[in-house]
Amino acid sequence: MITYRATLDVPEHTLAFVARILAAHRRRTDRRPWQRAATVYVQAVMVLRWFRDGTAVAALARDARISQATAYRYLHEGIDVIAAHAPDLHDVLERGIESGWEHVCLDGTLIASTRCRERSESGHDVWYSGKHRRHGGNVQVLTDPTGYPVWISDVAPGSVHDITAARRGGILGALYHAAAGGMPTLADKGYTGAGIGVHVPTKGHDLDTGTRCRNTLLSAMRAPAERANALLKTRWKALQRVSLCPWRIGAIAAAALVLLHLQAPAW
């Protein structure tokens, strides 16, 4: 077997943060933390390697000299510990109003996953997205006016439409309250009918000049939001295709947002 040195493209302060919160978690939950198979530092490196490069768990276990079952347990634990530091939707919106944001943008994205055979009562595959023609989970991403992601929702199966996911997750109610405070939401046509305060382009052909102008302005204002999903998925390759249980996608995306904020607090 050939060994070689490798560099993890993650700032040291990010590793220090992950190791610190993992150590705090161990102190709270472990009765005998000294009996752990790997140190906090090794676990933090494992988790960051998985997020950054999508490294196979078998390779992580081999390099850490632990069993594959322990590596999976450490990975899930790390995801949950990091995701617990994700921002709350209401706190984000309140901070936006206080900061004078003109608007926020809402957009749904599909986090691809390995195939999961889960059928609904009607018999269709709940994790298959007909729009994207692949399996995955639907998460809602909220961005500030510059297009930087500031909040991510929990996961919904890939077959769920964006507006349905926003309604089920209680997102629209929070956005209505923010709009009443002077901060509306911009979204694409997939959110048509979302309600007052959520502005979407008007559907249809042969629209009048004023409506076409409004559609163009809305599209231009929310265009930066398209970069948010690309930023998350290119920075954290684990989001390009999740091989864990698809119900874990929400926690994985939330943890990725926390790590992104540590590395790039602004554009």
Image: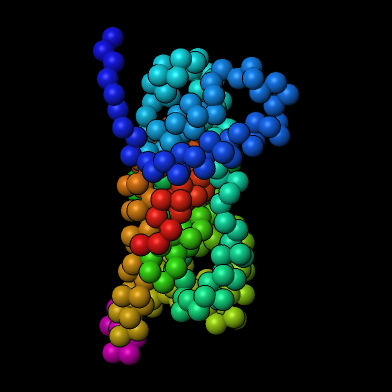
Q: Is residue 115 visible?
A: no
Considering depth in this image, is 191 or 177 the residue closer to the camera? 177
Query: Which picture quadrant has residue 169?
Result: bottom right
Residue 180 position, x and y percent, is 60, 81
Question: Does the magenta-highlighted stretch encompass residue 208?
Answer: yes
Name the residue rendered at 41%, 72% in the picture: 145
Q: Quadrant of the C terminus?
A: bottom left
| Colour mode of the rendering | rainbow
Q: Which residues are magenta?
A: 205-212
Q: Residue furthest right?
A: 31
Would you say 140 lies left or right of 24 here? left
Query: Which picture quadrant has residue 224?
Result: bottom left
Question: Does the magenta-highlighted stretch encompass residue 207?
Answer: yes
Name the residue rendered at 60%, 71% in the picture: 94
Considering depth in this image, is 21 or 161 the residue closer to the camera? 21
Residue 236 position, x and y percent, is 38, 43
Q: Is 92 above or below relative to 102?
A: above
